[in-house]
Image (cartoon, rainbow, N blue to C red):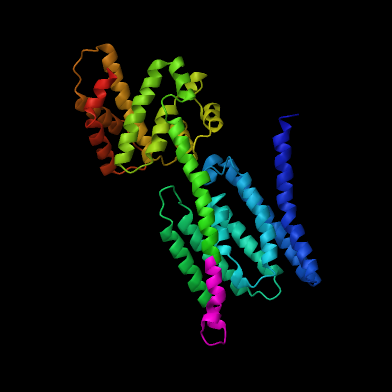
Amino acid sequence: MEGDKPALNEKIINTAMFLFPGIAAFIVSVYNACDYESLLRNTIVAFIISAVILFMIKDAENRGSEGFLFDNYSKKYRFIIAFFIMTVISCVLSFVPALFWPYMSFFVILSLLSNAEIGLVSGIFFTMLSVMLGESVSYSSFCMFVLAGVIAVAFFRDLKEDTAIIYPLFISLLAQSVLIVAFEVLFQNRTLSLKLLMLPIINLLLNLIIMLVFLNMFGVYILRKSNDMYMEINDTEYPLLISLKEKDKNEYYRAIHTGYLSERVSKELSLNDRAAKTCAYYHKIGKLEGKKNWEEVSHYYTDNNFPPDAIRLLREYINPGKNEIKSKETLTVYMCELVVTAIMYAVKKDKEAKIDYDKVIDNIFDRAENEEKLLGYDITYWEYAKIRKILKKEKLYYDFLR
């Protein structure tokens, strides 16, 4: 019975998400004394769009963590809460002049709490709801806010911890101001004055304040939290790694050395070095239970709250999809592991042997090319040659493998 509770809770939440917008639209329409046709239209549209959003969420869930931005796959409650709050806000905004609507920032919030597609559809839905329920709101306002939202989402969809938000924020607000002038100010038969520009200025200030507050909270509680998680799991004394050490010391040290080299190479190539190091450390954690398939080992990563980028690389490394283009980070880990394995094997045979590291690395890379092991990787010849060059520079480190 306890196992049925999560499924039951999910059904209750999905039902509430489907019904709430339609009921809210119906209540506001009745309050506004809308005619029968408008009341029916508003309610039906609310039900249809909420159903579409639920379908998109389910579709994203089926793709796993890759279907969502950041760690939203395991923290879907953020979007669910935002969905209910936005439903209420969209109804309230229908009583407010359209130039006060800060929908540009709402588009970004909804996207960052789910993914770009769900955020766009949700933003369009809530904007449409405010327009339909508003008594004197033109559909040109709808077009204006949707265009501004699309532009903002495009600039913020790749938000990272080290992203300078000034540039995307400036472009988004500039686009919003231009669209307000094009859709609203130019069509007012009044002399241009500060009073005429007051509402557009207030709109920009509202969007700016909401964006700054949200992005600051987002950075502290989501982006930086991911960085803290990397620091924790990439510690050689992390319990999961210690368990691997107790199970198989050779595999543990192979992972540690591969992680070091993967991090060095990834940094030189400006790749995601933290995720590459995590992939190198944990891609064989299935040895704890004698498991190899992704379905059998993925629980280690979700149970320990691995960052989404790390989980994506681990899945790609352990069980790449058919005809899937694999990342540079995955190739980096693969080549580093081959080098570490070859040197550890040579040392195990003869600890006093003099190893020509350049020759070992050249043989590994030449064999990978001849056996077409590189097919399917998103890598250029220059980057591939760079990996080989960087690994050859680590001769002093290879002596520690003895």
Q: Residue at x 53, y 44 (%)?
A: 221
Residue 352 horizontal side relative to residue 19, left or right? left
Image position, residue 298 (x, y; %): 53, 30
Q: Which residues are magenta?
A: 183-205
Whole-percent x, y for residue 284 in the image: 44, 24
Position of residue 113 measured from the top left corner of the image (x, y, whole percent): 56, 50
Would you identify the image quadrant in which residue 362 lies? top left
Q: Residue at x 56, y 44 (%)?
A: 72
Q: Determine the image quadrant of residue 143.
A: bottom right
Observer able to see residue 149: no
Drawn side of residue 330 relative to residue 191, left or right:
left
Q: Is residue 191 magenta?
A: yes
Decide which of 315, 109 is in the foreground and name it. Answer: 109
Looking at the image, residue 319 sits to the left or right of residue 344; the answer is right
Determine the residue positioned at 32% across, 22% down: 341
Q: Is residue 265 above or below residue 175?
A: above
Q: Quadrant of the N terminus?
A: top right
User: Can you see residue 281?
Assistant: yes
When the figure is inspected, residue 58 is found, relative to residue 191, above or below; the finding is above
Identity of the residue drawn at 71% across and 45% down: 13
